[in-house]
Image (cartoon, helix red, strand yellow):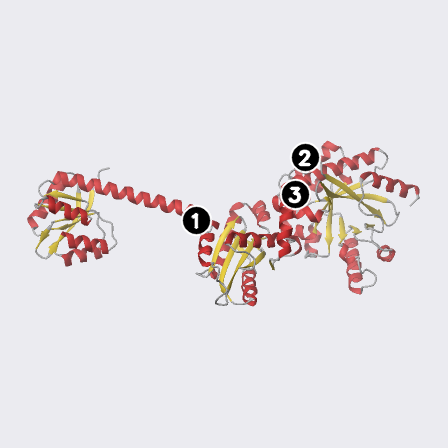
């Protein structure tokens, strides 16, 4: 590649020689911008005041020595081709300047040769520059998160490993790992697009970075997960204080494209060296803490405990075998009857999935549904449950129980899926179940995570004729204005209110208020968790329409539920 524009620093004692060199290079097609100096002081000043493509220097003259000039160039940390252009070209001179770092030595008067050397050196410098850029790019891609600019896990682990030592407790200090997960990011991505989700992650990374320093290292693990390593701690109160500082970072909403988005953080915390001897073990234990019983807590932190590690091992076994559960026909449905409090007949049933695990026996949903949620396998399980439940309801109807409806729970992840509408329609078509015999139950908290998106989805389901129930009502944070906008048919009072109903004035007042609210909106009210006759009497008096609970029946197999339906119909129960 020819370099037609040159910025040269020329060191020579003769103005005539400099002009001759300029003219020779111009004849060879070079547009020359140059500076002429004739001393070491002038050379040093020129290095400081500007940058140069190349340096063309005499070997030796009064007040100047090329070998000393090469030392000055090296001390300046500038990488500029230094070409000796001199009449002194004996072997000793050439070897001395090359050993000192000169690019080449050219005899004066051979301007064409000098031009070729300059072009060669500039090409070499360009190659080195591009290699540095490529190396820098590879390094950034390998060690830094492209979205946030934070260290990736591998660089994070390298940095943390250098801070950890076996004698960490000698000075009375210890370290902590905070494994952080952002709630709602999948829902935000599916509702507003990944661009909004990416901006949210960037904004959160900026907020988290205010606590990042030499002893407090931040990384983005992947997706919605971050981690802090905090060294130099002296007591657990400091650990808790830092955790609370992190949680408060999301109290202010994230503003993106005129949207105000709220998220919450959950943290698993473990400490070195008690909870792990190296960074990989610390991260694993902190993440396990985050995953353990995650569905029972939000926007808070939990400390690692030994039983979490043991539970995590079993959890891993369950996660690996869960992927084969449907193919191996290990999932089964049990049905809990819904009783009409006016006629006392069984009018429907809620489908509840169980896992007949070959090693651990019959597992309840709380043992595997949280794992299915986190791995995304809940979508396949949900599809299987919906199909099997609708098929069973159709079978009951074909043998004379046309009024029986089937209730199926819809998870937050399923509600986020754009294919939910098509899947429900497909199952109804395949099983030939009347849509008004299908009831989809969605918890209040799930609906309110993104109320506007939920309303749109529910309207589409309602257009099919499907009935919608709000489950666990009273435990969330829905407002009356939103409740009026949700196209729902049934409110299911959370079972927690049933426990002390009738004896606890607060619970009784809440249940009575919910029933009155539902009736004002022309909604059906169903109570769960009914276990005693006193609870049933209270609900009946308050005007509740339907009830479920152990007073009537535990969840049972399809055959047993059919027997119960027959017995209630004939009055033998």
- Residue at which label 1 appears: 143
> Are the residues flagged by discs 1 and 2 in contact, CB closer than 8 Å?
no
Q: Position of residue 365 (x, y in %)?
A: 71, 47
Task: Identify the mark at residue 327; answer none if there is no mark.
Answer: 2
Query: As displayed, is residue 525 above or below residue 210?
Result: above
Quadrant housing the N terminus = top left
Q: Is residue 380 left or right of residue 251?
A: right
**Real-space Cα distance between discs 1 and 2?**
40 Å
Mark 1 Cα-neighbour bin, 10 Å: few <14, some 14–19, many ≥20: some
Mark 3 Cα-neighbour bin, 10 Å: few <14, some 14–19, many ≥20: many
- Residue at which label 3 appears: 378
**Real-space Cα distance between discs 1 and 3?**
33 Å
Q: Is residue 201 left or right of residue 518?
A: left
Can you tell which quarter of the image residue 468 is in? top right
Task: Identify the mark at residue 72; answer none if there is no mark.
Answer: none
Q: Position of residue 451 (x, y in %)?
A: 64, 51
SS assignment at label 2: loop
| Of pointers 1 and 2, the one earlier in the residue sequence | 1
Of tags 2 and 3, which is closer to the observer? 2
Of tags 1 and 3, which is closer to the observer? 1
Can you tell which quarter of the image residue 268 is in? bottom right
**Real-space Cα distance between discs 2 and 3?**
15 Å
- One can see residue 496 in this view: yes
SS assignment at label 3: helix
Q: Is residue 150 left or right of residue 456?
A: left
SS assignment at label 1: helix
């Amino acid at each position: 590649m020819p370099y037609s524009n040159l910025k040269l620093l020329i060191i020579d004692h003769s103005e005539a020689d400099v002009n001759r060199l300029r003219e020779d290079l111009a004849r060879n097609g070079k547009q020359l911008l140059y500076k002429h100096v004739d001393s070491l002081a002038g050379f040093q000043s020129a290095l400081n005041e500007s940058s140069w493509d190349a340096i063309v220097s005499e070997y030796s003259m009064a007040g100047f020595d090329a070998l000393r000039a090469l030392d000055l160039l090296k001390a300046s940390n500038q990488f500029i081709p230094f070409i000796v252009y001199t009449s002194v070209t004996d072997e000793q001179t050439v070897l001395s300047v090359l050993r000192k770092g000169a690019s080449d030595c050219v005899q004066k008067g051979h301007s064409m040769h000098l031009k070729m050397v300059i072009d060669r050196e500039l090409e070499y410098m360009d190659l080195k520059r591009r290699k540095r850029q490529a190396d820098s790019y590879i390094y950034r891609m390998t060690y830094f998160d492209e979205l946030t600019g934070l260290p990736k896990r591998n660089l994070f682990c390298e940095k943390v490993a250098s801070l950890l030592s076996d004698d960490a407790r000698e000075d009375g200090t210890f370290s902590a790992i905070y494994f952080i997960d952002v709630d709602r990011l999948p829902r935000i991505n599916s509702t507003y697009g990944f661009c909004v989700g990416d901006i949210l992650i960037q904004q959160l990374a900026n907020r988290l970075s205010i606590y990042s320093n030499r002893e407090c290292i931040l990384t983005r693990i992947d997706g919605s997960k971050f981690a802090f390593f905090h060294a130099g701690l002296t007591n657990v109160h400091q650990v808790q204080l830092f955790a609370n500082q992190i949680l408060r970072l999301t109290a202010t909403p994230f503003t993106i494209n005129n949207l105000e988005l709220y998220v919450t953080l959950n943290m698993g915390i473990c400490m070195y060296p008690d909870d792990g001897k190296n960074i990989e073990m610390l991260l694993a234990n902190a993440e396990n803490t985050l995953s353990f019983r995650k569905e029972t807590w939000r926007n808070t932190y939990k400390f690692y405990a030994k039983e979490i590690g043991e539970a995590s091992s079993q959890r891993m076994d369950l996660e690996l075998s869960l992927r084969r559960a449907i193919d191996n026909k290990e999932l089964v449905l049990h049905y809990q009857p819904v009783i009409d409090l006016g006629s006392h007949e069984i009018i429907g049933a809620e489908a509840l999935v169980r896992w007949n695990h070959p090693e651990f026996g019959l597992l309840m949903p709380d043992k595997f549904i949280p794992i299915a949620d986190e791995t995304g396998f809940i979508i396949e399980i949900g599809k299987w449950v919906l199909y099997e439940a609708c098929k069973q309801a159709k079978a009951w109807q074909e043998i004379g129980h046309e009024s029986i409806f089937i209730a199926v729970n819809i998870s937050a992840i399923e509600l986020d899926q754009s294919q939910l509408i098509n899947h429900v329609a497909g199952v109804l078509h395949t099983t030939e179940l009347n849509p008004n015999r299908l009831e989809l139950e969605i918890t209040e908290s799930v609906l309110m995570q993104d109320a506007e998106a939920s309303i749109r989805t529910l309207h589409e389901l309602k257009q099919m004729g499907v009935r919608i129930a709000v489950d666990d009502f009273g435990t969330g944070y829905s407002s009356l204005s939103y409740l009026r906008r949700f196209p729902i048919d049934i409110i299911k009072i959370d079972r927690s209110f049933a426990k002390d109903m009738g004896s606890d004035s607060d619970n009784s007042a809440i249940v009575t208020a919910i029933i009155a609210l539902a009736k004002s909106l022309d909604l059906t009210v169903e109570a769960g968790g009914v276990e005693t006759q006193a609870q049933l009497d209270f609900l009946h008096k308050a005007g509740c329409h339907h009830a479920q609970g152990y007073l009537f029946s535990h969840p049972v197999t399809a055959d047993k539920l059919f027997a119960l339906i027959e017995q209630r119909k004939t009055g033998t129960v």
